[in-house]
Image (cartoon, rainbow, N blue to C red):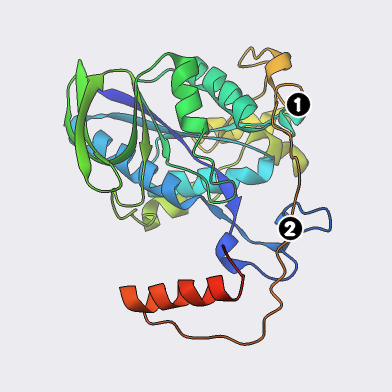
Amino acid sequence: MAYKCIVLIKQVPDTSRITGEAMNEDGTVNRGALPAIFNPEDLNALELALEIKEKYGGSVTAVTMGLPSASEVLREALFMGADDAVLVTDRRCAASDTLATSYILTRAAEKIGCDLVLCGRQAIDGDTAQVGPQMAEKLDMPQITYVEEVHELTPSRIVCRRNMGNGWQRTACKLPVLLTVTDQANEPRIGAARRIMKYKNAKTPAEISKEGGSDEDIREMKNKGLLIGQLNLDDVQADLQWCGRDGSPTKVHRIMSVVLTAKESKEVDSSAQGINDMVHELIEDHTIG
């Protein structure tokens, strides 16, 4: 049996390059001040899907939701070995929280069809780890989270090793299944030169239109195998009450900007005694406690 895998990927701001301009005055992330990258653990999910394809057969479709500029991570997925890529983009997706995002991606996954859904454990811009598990509930699929390795895969079941924090667990369940993958699972491959040369010009219809292209240009790209798939909320038959701001119950109660004022530093010994001494010092200073 060949397995059809969908890998959910996300373009995120590179939070490892935080500068003084990283936050807006209202406390939101100034995404324009940070370079956009492929969410790191989504790379591990994509690598695992490619390994499944190579060992058991099948196909890999990379899916992302966002603005047309998010197509960049889809091209990177094609460079690595994905067979197809799909951008879910629609102005009505704006302001979606994890609940709305998981609903929209669920509708897209149902339209595409799959045996396995893989995604990174969490995205570095939100660190919620909610979208994958929420999708499993909406898809009525079992889920295995914190996956490090696939031990066995048959048409009837999958066996995975998952990280338990203080150890690991061998877990089995039926297909179809959703897996969330950690950065311990593998070392993501780099894009192959041959695929980079082929797919560097792959584009979505939105990108072609933005450049002044016509429907004929879109058909030509499709005939060349360079057209990245694109879906909107009508295509996936989404109920608009569950999308965007209307479908997002998350409310921000308060935003606090932490400003570090200390100009001095102190080196603490990494031993248990060193940490114990530091905690006592902080308690005596009424910094904590």
Q: CA distance from mark 1 to mark 2?
A: 21 Å
Q: Position of residue 198 (x, y in %)?
A: 46, 48
- Visible in this render: residue 271? no
Label 1 CA crowd tier, 10 Å (few <14, some 14–19, many 20+): some
**Residue occupied by mark 1:** 92
Residue lying at 62% horizontally and 87% vertically, measured from the top left: 264
Residue lying at 73% horizontally and 27% vertically, measured from the top left: 244
Q: Is residue 48 above or below residue 286?
A: above
- Visible in this render: residue 170? yes
Q: Name which residue type carries label 1.
A: Arg
Q: Secondary structure at mark 2?
A: helix
Q: Secondary structure at mark 1?
A: helix
Label 2 CA crowd tier, 10 Å (few <14, some 14–19, many 20+): few
Considering every residue shown, the one lying at the far front of the view is 284
Residue lying at 67% horizontally and 23% vertically, measured from the top left: 232
Q: Position of residue 22 (x, y in %)?
A: 71, 63
Q: Name which residue type carries label 2.
A: Gly
Q: Earlier in the sequence, mark 1 or mark 2?
A: 2
Marker disc for residue 32: 2
Residue sitting nearer the eye, 249 or 254: 254
- Quarter of the picture containing the N terminus is top left
